[in-house]
Image (spheres, rainbow, N blue to C red):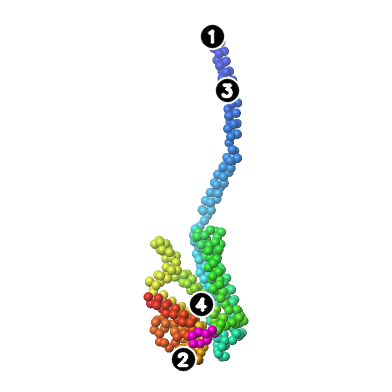
Amino acid sequence: MENVDNLNANNALESEKINVENYDSKPTIKSNMNSHNASIDWSSVINNFNLNDNMKKSNTKVNKVIKHVNFEDIDIVMKRREIGVRKIDICSFLLTLGILVLQYTENDIFISENKNEGKLKNKSNAICTMLRCLIILLTILLEITIYFHYKLKLILQKNLGLHNRTASLKSAGMRKFLIQEIIICGLVCPPYLDKTMKGVALSGKYEYSLDAVILGLSMMKSYHLLRIYRHYSSWLTEEALKICKNHKIVGNLEFAIKSEIRHRPYKFIAAVTIVTLVILGILVLLAEISFEPDPAKIDSMPPPTVTLKEIGRSMWLISVTMTTIGFGDMYPMTHIGRVFVTSSCIIGKLINV
């Protein structure tokens, strides 16, 4: 019995020792945890958790947006803007055509009023003044359409990813072309500004009015024809551009013109011939209509039997020169007129090639 009691007493002592040791080890564990917690930067941990939460939220928002995006609607918007650019270009072409017709009519009235006295007067009548005011009004509308053309073009290029969303006309490189077009299309003769330029050319004298000079420079506005052709050319449709992209070909205006020359040469030659006849015919008329031969120099260089003071005759001369026939019954008497006739000959040679 004594031995049993001794064993129970020893077991109780050992259990008390173990409890004492465990009690002593708890403070050491707590102290280690406190030292470890002190070494951790809890602010960075919290920030990381916040960033992860924000990224998850943003990803969920993006996924929701993507689910609700209808890419067919985007294509519809793009096509509408392309149609908007087309309508703007059509308006620009019609305004340009109207301005050129009014400028030619006003200049013809101005010249006919001066023919009675044999020289140009520095005064325009009421009809010329009214037409010039109307031309200025149409020119303002033309400048507005040109500006919207570039704005819509920039929006289209942004949607295609060619420029940043914050890009402007300047950063996109369009501002210089916009300024050039505004200058070219803004060439008009103001009312009551009737100035003339006199000089001697070959065997006579010329006297050009400022109105005629501006009309000649205004022929540069005919570039609007190329924009209309770009919109309605069968070589620049959406299907044609996809084929060009598959064959790694740049589908631009140059490609369309080359295709026209190769596959439809007669239509291309007819169109170029008509445009050349009209533009160069007007330019030759403006260069020759105010020329008066000097009687003292008629023997050294006699004037032609037919003068170039009508639009029909000047266009006939251009057509004869382009086809390299040359009857010799009419020819230009001024240096500027000869430049235009020579250029028509070069264009005719290029067309024949």
| Between marks 4 and 1 in the image, the one whose residue lies nearer the viewer | 4
Does 140 lie within the magenta span?
A: no
Rendered image: mark on residue 299: 2
Secondary structure of the residue carrying numbered label 3: helix
Sequence order check: which comes first, mark 3 or mark 4? Answer: 3
Secondary structure of the residue carrying numbered label 2: loop
Magenta-highlighted residues: 199-207
Cα distance between the residues tagged 3 and 4: 105 Å
In this rendering, is residue 207 above or below 57? below
| Between marks 4 and 2 in the image, the one whose residue lies nearer the viewer | 2
Sequence order check: which comes first, mark 1 or mark 3? Answer: 1
In the rendered image, the residue lying farthest to the top is 2
Cα distance between the residues tagged 4 and 1: 132 Å
Sequence order check: which comes first, mark 1 or mark 2? Answer: 1
Percent of width and height locating residue 352: 38, 77
For disc 4, the marked residue is 219
Cα distance between the residues tagged 4 and 2: 36 Å
For disc 1, the marked residue is 3
Which three-letter amino acid code belongs to the residue tagged 2?
Asp
Contact (Cβ within 8 Å) of mark 2 with mark 3: no
